[in-house]
């Protein structure tokens, strides 16, 4: 990806809005009703030994149930924390239900994470999924929101 | 707009993410730096006599400074409350800085507001802008987020 601004995020396209919810089936039902769409199935994130989940630097058993609504060219991700400490659980405990992150599809995860750390936006959590990896970045003091970086292979 | 689901929102496309911030110039600078974009100018919403702003049913002198970043086909709206009571001010006081709403472009404002009220999602604030009108709907108990409806003439 060409990047004319090496000290800028490698994407300006929000590809996803992620919401932490208490009960994924109940929330998915409300969204399906709102949009007149089918109820999506939910899936469980992989365990730590496969996802290599690191929450504030430490391996964690924290996982989540995920459900997606494809809305035009944005996906709405519903996230119900389960199983142990994670940013999702921390967010639900401190903020309650609501928008957890806005996501950008990038290339060069380590470089982008390092660039954001130089801007004073530290890494909160990272992990792998089939075909790619994600990182949550704490942009709340400057941007009012957590950023998610998504990199597919 | 064709709507196969009369009891569903007339759009599935998120056209905007709105964030309430404390200092619009500081936040706009952080976003401009993040994306490698120019600092946008901010503008002030119209006064009540032109915008017909109704906050929880009552006319209000509450206004806001607004600044926009065009990101692909979503706009990011930064909102700094000024001048009096409003959903923006209420949100900043109760939630702090963060994502205030996700917005959908619809047709038939009164019908859509009534339909959402039937789903238990009441109107929080409405107003006019040049060429159109907006409404904030309280979707937080069911959806975890405030919805904004935008209707252009």
Image (cartoon, coloured by chain):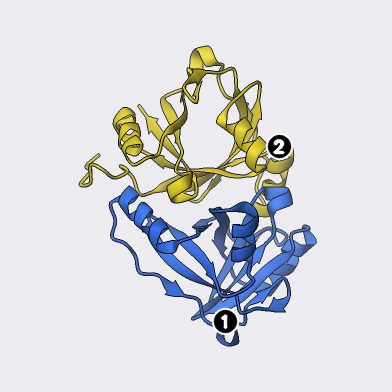
Chain colours: A blue, B yellow
Q: Position of residue A35 (x, y in %)?
A: 32, 50
Q: Is residue A140 left or right of residue B91?
A: right
Q: Nearer the viewer, residue A98 or A76?
A: A98
| Residue A62 occupies quadrant | bottom right
Return the residue at label 1: A51
User: Residue at the spot x=56%, y=61% of the render?
Assistant: A104
Residue A42 visible to the viewer: yes
Q: Residue at x 66, y 70 (%)?
A: A125
Q: Number of marks in the image? A: 2
| Vertical position of residue A125 compared to residue B127: above or below | below
Q: Examine the rendering and report whether any part of residue B33 can be seen.
A: no
Tell me which chain the residue with mark 2 is part of: B
| Label 1 Cα crowd, 10 Å radius (few <14 / some 14-19 / many 20+) | some
Left or right, A106 with respect to A70, comes to: right
Query: Mark 2 = which residue?
Result: B22
Instruction: Name the residue furthest bottom.
Output: A49
Classed neighbour count for the residue bearing mark 2: other residues with Cα under 10 Å, few (<14), some (14–19), many (≥20) = some
Q: Are marks 1 and 2 in contact (CB under 8 Å)?
A: no
Figure check: A7 above or below B49: below
| B53 or A3, nearer to the observer | B53
* Labels 1 and 2 positioned on one and the same chain: no
Image quarter in which the N terminus of chain A is found: bottom right
Q: Relative to residue A101, is residue A42 depicted above or below?
A: below
Instruction: State the SS at label 2.
Output: loop
């Amino acid at each position: 990806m060409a990047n004319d601004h090496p000290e800028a995020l490698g994407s300006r396209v929000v590809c996803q809005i992620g919401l932490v919810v208490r009960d994924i089936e109940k929330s998915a039902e409300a969204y399906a009703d709102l949009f007149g769409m089918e109820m999506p199935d939910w899936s469980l994130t992989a365990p730590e030994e496969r996802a290599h989940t690191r929450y504030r630097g430490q391996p964690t058993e924290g996982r989540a149930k995920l459900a997606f609504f494809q809305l035009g060219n944005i996906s709405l991700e519903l996230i119900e924390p389960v199983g142990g400490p994670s940013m999702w659980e921390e967010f639900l405990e401190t903020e309650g239900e609501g928008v957890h992150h806005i996501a950008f599809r990038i290339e060069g995860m380590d470089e982008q994470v390092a660039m954001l750390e130089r801007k004073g936006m530290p890494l909160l959590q990272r992990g792998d999924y089939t075909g790619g990896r994600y990182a949550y970045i704490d942009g709340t003091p400057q941007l009012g929101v957590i950023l998610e970086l998504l990199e597919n292979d």
